[in-house]
């Protein structure tokens, strides 16, 4: 089994390598020291930075609020550490709003935002106490919050719509309810949806802001171009991998029943990542990547299980597997893309795995402050990885990930980056071609029918 | 958020039952008992009359009947009261002191590594009882041990605060100590010491200071965020310690060369100051396991007026140049620790590099209230 997987991996690497034009290799690329951001990320791109920052903060909010609500409803120990992190995330969001709309708006946002966090936690606490009246009161006030928040957004920018936030709140509550009911599969499904939704919300806000202040964000078209879409897709999938790994680890160390559903959610994320790789490099490469990636996840979950059970031998062997797999992932990516140096990629993956291990050991020791801090830092690190990979891919396939010349007119929220979808021009020519073919076939049919009639 | 109490405790080595048959300064083995019986002055080990530290002839200054450390202690006291006169009268002492000063400076400059090899430190479990009274910030720390004068060089000197100016928190020490654990994994403990050279207290918010471990070539090979700092509220002239341990570095120990720090500070608010003296650490003790790693234990007492529900207690072992050797801490849910009540701790978390007992000059213990009720 092992040999077969490795053989397929090798074949895929060779296959992908053969696809690489030598010219690209020749033009490639400055070696980038590990730990530094890649060239595209270092450019002045305020609109792209805004889009990434809002998505990152809102995605982190989704993770932290849901973890805090879960901890609160179950009366678990990490609530205080999560609460501190949630406060910090809210401060950062307020700063982001304040930087665009000024101090007064920042204050108004903070009041509303902190209020909704408190209401969600009150809802979770009421659930823990089985206090139906308090639950209903929290829900009633959350309804009012949605109205007020929508008004705040509309006041700031006519293009903003409040229903996105209402949908996000509903997903938070769905997830908590599912968790309380012991329906962990549904809880993780709601979480995955909410996490993706927050990225869409970040896009929506960023697009509105960029349209509103074009002088301050002159790179608006670039921020919503296929290359930025690719970066955001990778950011989202890698960041989701991190938070799902953290939650599954927490369940594994504590021995709670949500370990398996968490592992399955993690597998779903791995499949999405493999799909993203496949959409760039072809399905065979995507499948091969998925296999190596899943092996790295499996090794980590084995490590977590060993930590939970105190099995030193299993811990040791899973660490050895992690050693091997992060090297394999780096080998794979460096072979697939000549703009990526194996050592640089290995350094990024290594730091990610170091963080996974540190957070697991901190959780096992009851050091929730360290576990949460490590998770947050690793979460931010995934955006560096996403930016680095996206930049390398864009430089490899510049025609597929061109910058737009003007801002898109509609919502940019979509699962697939536009560079990975058919370009509008291609779509139009396909439709025209098909239409022409159908017309030709109909005409030919008529002609043939007339010919047959005449022949008879 | 935090309330910090510092208890600086010196390692008391006066509790040996049988003196070891090796030099606790340099590790050299002593002569076999048969040789000692026949030729008592050949290669014999000497026991310090002050701290009972065992030294070989190379590490024995032949002056005051004390080990080199206590000699320096006496010398330093004498110099501070009568500068230069004692040196003129005692050239041997001056020479010995000079040698020690040069050695300490060499260690501080990294010319002589403080001596934590990769792998286990072999030998017996060493153990030291902490005895001297605490040097405190906040004035609340005490120990229940005996209160003999410190027999050891004080390894955590206070910086001279610059009058009544604002807090000036600067990195005074950034150290990485790699080792290979029992399953062959290269691990590393990272320390960053931050000294307040200003005139008022400063604050180090937890989980905001990050670090990057660099290879000799300058590449980042590991990074992290310090979730804990001991203490967060830093009085003028005092040093706080950030501690973190990388459980798996996935690299060779040689690749872990230096530490870059991105320090986050802020002025303390009234709550930080009010809560700075609510906990103290007592009965601090530590031992070295068979693999050389440190276990620390003791009690944390709530000296404040409010109940504490969660706390962190950290123990830092320092060498003779004030360099950090090992740090362990315990984060506990203490379930509403009432004012006046105490709770025990015992921890080897998050893991520390192997330490030679003789290399430890002093120990600092800190307790921080993470969550206070009311």
Image: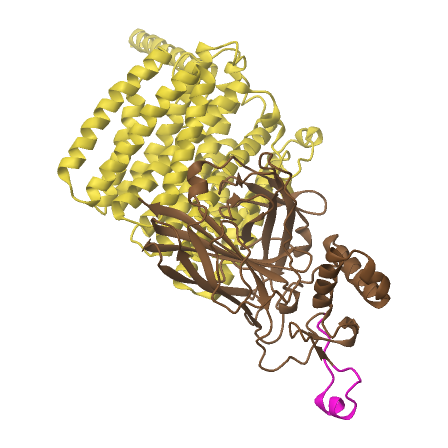
Chain colours: A yellow, B brown
In the image, A364 versus A289, the foreground residue is A364
Q: Tell me if residue B360 comes above or below residue A13 in the rendering.
A: below
The residue under the point 42% across, 42% down is B274
The answer to whether B356 appears left or right of A104 in the picture is right
In the image, A213 versus A445, the foreground residue is A213
The answer to whether B34 appears left or right of B351 in the picture is right
In the image, A10 versus B231, the foreground residue is B231
Q: Tell me if residue B122 comes above or below residue A204 in the rendering.
A: below
The furthest residue to the left: A133
* Horizontal and vertical percent position of residue B112: 75, 59
In the image, A57 versus B163, the foreground residue is B163
Q: Is residue B349 magenta?
A: no
Q: Tell me if residue B320 comes above or below residue B21 in the rendering.
A: above
Q: Quadrant of the N terminus of chain B?
A: top left
Q: Is residue B32 magenta?
A: yes
Residue B125, by quadrant, is: bottom right
* Horizontal and vertical percent position of residue B268: 49, 37
* Horizontal and vertical percent position of residue B225: 53, 44
Report the magenta stretch's main SS: loop
The answer to whether B38 appears left or right of A186 in the picture is right
Q: Quadrant of the C terminus of chain B?
A: top left
The answer to whether B94 appears left or right of B351 in the picture is right
Q: Which residues are magenta?
A: B26-44
Q: Can see residue A242?
A: no
């Amino acid at each position: 089994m092992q040999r077969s997987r490795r053989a397929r991996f090798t074949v895929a690497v060779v296959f992908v390598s053969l696809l690489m034009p030598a010219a690209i290799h020749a033009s490639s690329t400055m070696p980038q020291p590990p730990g530094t951001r890649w060239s595209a990320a270092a450019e002045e791109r305020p609109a792209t930075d805004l889009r990434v920052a809002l998505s990152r903060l809102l995605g982190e909010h989704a993770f932290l609020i849901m973890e805090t609500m879960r901890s609160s409803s179950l009366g678990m120990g990490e609530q205080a550490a999560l609460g501190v992190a949630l406060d910090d995330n809210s401060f950062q969001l307020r700063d982001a709003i304040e930087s665009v709309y000024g101090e007064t708006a920042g204050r108004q946002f903070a009041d509303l935002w902190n209020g909704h966090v408190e209401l969600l936690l009150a809802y979770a606490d009421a659930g823990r106490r089985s206090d139906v009246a308090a639950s209903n009161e929290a829900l009633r006030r959350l309804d009012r919050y949605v109205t007020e928040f929508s008004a705040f957004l509309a006041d700031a920018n006519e293009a903003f719509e409040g229903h996105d936030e209402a949908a996000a709140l509903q997903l938070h509550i769905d997830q908590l309810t599912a968790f309380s009911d012991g329906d962990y599969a549904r809880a993780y499904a709601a979480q995955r949806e909410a996490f993706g939704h927050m990225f869409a919300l970040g896009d929506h806000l960023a697009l509105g802001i960029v349209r509103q202040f074009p002088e301050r964000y002159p790179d608006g078209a670039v921020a919503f171009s296929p290359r930025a879409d690719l970066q955001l897709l990778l950011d989202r999938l890698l960041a989701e991998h991190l938070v799902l790994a953290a939650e599954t680890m927490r369940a594994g160390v504590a021995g709670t029943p949500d370990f398996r559903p968490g592992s399955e959610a993690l597998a779903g994320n791995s499949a999405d990542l493999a799909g993203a790789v496949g959409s760039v490099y072809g399905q065979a490469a995507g499948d091969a990547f998925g296999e190596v990636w899943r092996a790295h996840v499996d090794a980590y979950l084995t490590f977590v299980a060993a930590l939970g059970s105190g099995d030193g031998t299993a811990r040791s062997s899973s660490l050895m597997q992690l050693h091997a797999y992060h090297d394999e992932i780096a080998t794979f990516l460096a072979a697939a893309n000549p703009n990526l140096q194996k050592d640089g990629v290995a350094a990024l993956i290594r730091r990610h795995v170091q963080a996974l291990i540190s957070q697991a050991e901190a959780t096992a020791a009851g050091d929730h402050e360290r576990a949460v801090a490590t998770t947050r830092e690793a979460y931010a690190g995934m955006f560096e990885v996403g930016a680095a990979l996206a930049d390398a891919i864009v430089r490899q396939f510049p025609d597929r990930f061109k910058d737009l010349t003007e801002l898109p007119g509609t919502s940019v929220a979509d699962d697939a980056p536009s560079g990975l979808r058919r370009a509008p021009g291609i779509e139009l020519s396909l439709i025209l071609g098909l239409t022409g073919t159908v017309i030709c076939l109909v005409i030919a049919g008529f002609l043939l029918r007339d010919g047959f009639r005449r022949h008879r | 958020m935090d309330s910090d109490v510092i208890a600086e405790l010196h390692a008391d080595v006066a509790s040996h039952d049988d003196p070891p048959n090796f030099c606790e300064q340099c590790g050299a083995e002593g002569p076999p008992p048969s040789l000692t019986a026949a030729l008592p002055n050949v290669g014999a080990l000497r026991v310090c009359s002050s701290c009972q530290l065992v030294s070989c002839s190379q590490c024995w200054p032949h002056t005051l009947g004390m080990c080199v450390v206590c000699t320096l202690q006496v010398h330093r006291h004498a110099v501070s009261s009568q500068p230069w006169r004692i040196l003129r009268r005692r050239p041997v002492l001056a020479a010995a002191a000079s040698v020690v000063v040069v050695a300490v400076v060499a260690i501080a400059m990294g010319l002589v590594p403080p001596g934590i090899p990769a792998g286990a430190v072999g030998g017996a479990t060493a153990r030291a009882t902490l005895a001297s009274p605490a040097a405190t910030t906040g004035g609340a720390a005490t120990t229940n041990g005996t209160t003999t004068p410190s027999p050891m060089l004080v390894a955590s000197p206070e910086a001279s605060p610059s009058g009544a100016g604002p807090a000036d928190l600067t990195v005074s020490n950034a150290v990485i100590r790699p080792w290979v654990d029992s399953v062959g994994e290269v691990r590393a403990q990272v320390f960053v010491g931050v000294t307040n050279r200003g005139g008022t207290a400063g604050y180090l918010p937890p989980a905001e200071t990050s670090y990057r471990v660099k290879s000799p070539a300058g590449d980042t090979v590991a990074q992290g965020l310090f979730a804990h700092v001991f203490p967060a509220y830093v009085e003028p002239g005092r040093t706080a310690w950030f501690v973190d341990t990388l459980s798996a570095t996935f690299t060779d120990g040689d690749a872990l060369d230096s530490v870059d720090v991105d320090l986050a500070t802020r002025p303390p608010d009234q709550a930080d100051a009010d809560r700075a003296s609510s906990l103290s650490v007592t009965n601090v003790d530590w031992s070295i396991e068979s693999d050389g790693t440190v276990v620390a234990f003791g009690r944390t007492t709530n000296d404040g007026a409010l109940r504490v529900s969660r706390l962190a207690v950290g123990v830092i072992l320092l060498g003779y140049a004030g360099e950090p050797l090992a740090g362990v801490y315990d984060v506990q849910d203490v379930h509403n620790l009432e004012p006046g009540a105490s709770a025990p701790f015992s921890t080897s978390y998050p893991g520390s590099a192997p330490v030679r007992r003789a290399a430890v000059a002093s120990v600092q213990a800190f307790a921080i209230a993470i969550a206070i009720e009311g």
